[in-house]
Amino acid sequence: MSRTPRTKAHPNARWKLDHDPEALPLGCNGLYGKSGYNKHKYHGTEPCEACKESKRHYERERDRGQNYPRKLKPCGTPAAAKRHRYNKEPLDIACRLAEQRERNEIRDRKRRAKLAASTDNQ
Ligand SMILES: [Zn+2]
Ligand SMILES: [Zn+2]
């Protein structure tokens, strides 16, 4: 058995436009992931389309880090502020400031885009 390390040219190299992250295609053994595919390999049979699709989906999700527990952003980032809001936690000052900063940036970006658009038209 030879194991060739998979080189990743791009983290989303296996991403397909019609890829549905929510879909859980099951192999012919009724399980999601590579187990059906591996079973075919183990028994020396050709993997069926269902098992291949399940394996492909699993690997795509793995490559985008979906099957791993996510690291939470630390306080003082807009993501942490959003998390506090989502969890209905009180906002601490660092997160409040980060949120404010993000809002200002978005506002400035919009303002600049508007300005650029208005000067283009004249
Ligand atoms: Zn199968
Ligand atoms: Zn916080």
Image: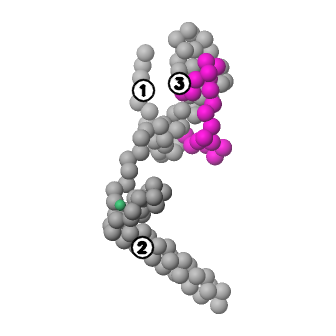
Alpha-carbon neighbours of circle 1 within 10 Å: few (<14), some, or many (≥20)? few
Tell me where the magenta segment starts and ends, as one range: 14-33
Q: Residue at x 55, y 40 (%)?
A: 14
Earlier in the chain: of badge 2 and badge 3, it is 3
Predominant SS along the magenta part: loop
Residue tagged by mark 1? 4
Q: Amino acid at mark 2?
A: Gln
- Which marked residue is nearer to the observer: mark 2 or mark 3? 2
Mark 1: secondary structure: loop
User: Image check: 37 left or right of 2?
Assistant: right
| Visible residue check, residue 109 | yes
Q: Quadrant of ligand 2?
A: bottom left
Instruction: Please tell me whether residue 21 belongs to the stretch shown in magenta.
Output: yes
Earlier in the chain: of badge 2 and badge 1, it is 1
Label 3 with label 1: CB-CB less than 8 Å: no
- Which marked residue is nearer to the observer: mark 3 or mark 1? 3
The circle on residue 118 is: none
- State which quarter of the image contains the N terminus: top left
Q: CA distance from mark 3 to mark 1?
A: 17 Å
- Residue 54, percent across and down? 60, 28
Residue at the far bottom in the pictured view: 122
Residue 119's quadrant in the figure? bottom right
Q: Is residue 83 above or below residue 71?
A: below
Mark 3: secondary structure: loop
Residue tagged by mark 2? 100
Residue 39's quadrant in the figure? top right
Residue tagged by mark 3? 34
Q: Residue at x 57, y 27 (%)?
A: 32
- Residue 13, percent across and down? 52, 43
Color style of the picture: one colour
